[in-house]
Image: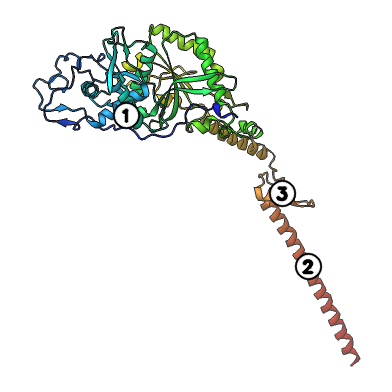
Amino acid sequence: MPADLTPDLAFEPHEPADRSPADGVDQVPPAPSMGPSTAPSMTPSADGRIGAGQPRKPGDFGTFDNPSKPLKQTWKPTHTRKKEVLKALGIFQRATADHLWRMLRPGDRHDRCTRDTLNALKEEGKVRVETRLESNHQLWVLTERGHKEAKQLLPKNVRMSVLRKLQYDDDGEPVDGDGYDEHAAAVTSTAAVLTGAGYGTPLSWQTEIAHRLPYGYTQYADLTMRAPDAGVPAMLLEVDRVNEPVDDLTAKLRRYNDWFELLAPKADKDREKAARRQGAAVHDFRLWSRIYPATGREGYVPVAFVFTGKTAAQRESRMRRLEQAARRYFAGTPYPWAGFTAVDYHQAVPVVVTELERITADPAGAAGPVWRRLGREEWQTLSEALDNPDGERLYRMEEEQNRRRQAERKAAEREAQRPVCTQCGTKFTDERWQSTRQSSWHSETDGLCGPCAAEHFGRIEAERVAQREAEEAAAREATEAEAKKNRGLFGRRR
């Protein structure tokens, strides 16, 4: 298999970024925030965190966001936080302070320190504001100096984003950048909310990873995630703003399925074909198992579609249409034996769907029941959605139940064939039945149970003994009579 069928880079486990709680760290004596920090945050999140620019809620006194009295402490953009921001921008290229806050420091009550960190890096010439979005958020990118430093900070196997070069107008003045579309924003937002919910770290993400196919097409994943601590060793994500034809989404699943079925280099085709009947054994011969870690569940690496934009009804309709069109790739195969309801998912693509709006509205965020597995109706947590309760686990249970039923049926059939004693009507014991079956000759006691046969043999033996004793007594009497006769003749001669 040609080497260029592998993704652009293989993933390796990364050391998590510093995720220490915000409380009690990075505190220094009073100092003004660096830079104006004018970018407002997004609307209050469902978990109670709000942006530093948000107005105080009624009764929300004494909180860090809007203290009733000036605090004697402030938050300092530490070296650790600066490195976090540089690495995140190195991966995602462009992000708002809100994205970085939710991704890097979800434990912070607000995004003020993140914005202060960005402004501190701006003064050092490592980041700059590319543009201000319609939402009034500032969009931050790396400068050439920051790009070089981020490249040094990131592991070698992490894909570095392309540098966004500063543009100038005809007068030589820098101009705001453009081209940051809503899809890119949704991709970064998705990574931010998932990371904030505990699914990996910023280094767990890769963007636009290529999966090359032998027929000349390359399928790029919007995001690839690694979160083994959260029970998701690997997952591919596609972000859709309800602006692509459903046929295009189905084609993506088809191409992912085609790529998962590619043989690894030097793999034996015959052995791979034979292993298809052995469940997970087939994956040892596939290319994907050399690139991605084992999923811990049946099937290929899961694919998630994150929908956002338009109306809730349009997003729901889109999910239903995708479910109908792509069933062949995620539905699995029923086991062929009668009485089995389990499904073989070993060569299926687990597909889950969610909505960015649903995630942000749920109190638990992406960790809540905001995921739906295609083929099911209920909304579940990601771990529950990826689980296969009707898969191999159910198959093993049904297999055991089937073995037990077969054993019971055979036992019933055997019991129906068990002989009955012709004398007392009692069923033969296993030992008695086995002894009559093993005997090479037939006797009159074959139809008798053990006790009756013993009684029969005892009676025969008693009769034999009695007959022998009678014969012995008769012989003694005859001998005695002969002796008396001989004594009488001898006495008369005298």
Res. 468 mark: 2
N-terminal label among 3 and 1:
1
Secondary structure of the residue carrying tag 3 is loop
Q: Give the residue pinned by disc 1.
A: 149
206 over 317 or under it: above or below? below
* CA distance for labels 1 and 2: 115 Å
x and y percentages locating residue 374 in the rendered image: 48, 18
* CA distance for labels 3 and 1: 95 Å
x and y percentages locating residue 343 in the rendered image: 55, 25
In the image, what residue type sits under mark 1? Glu
Q: In the rendered structure, are the residues bearing label 1 and label 2 in contact, judged by CB atoms less than 8 Å apart? A: no
Q: Give the residue pinned by disc 3.
A: 448
Residue 344 seen in the current view? no
x and y percentages locating residue 262 in the rendered image: 58, 27
Q: Please name which of the two marks, 1 or 2, marks the residue nearer to the observer.
A: 1
Residue ID at (75%, 65%) = 465
Give the quadrant of the C terminus.
Answer: bottom right
x and y percentages locating residue 40 in the rendered image: 23, 14
Secondary structure of the residue carrying tag 1 is helix
Which of the two residues, 18 or 420, is positioned nearer the viewer here?
18
Secondary structure of the residue carrying tag 2 is helix
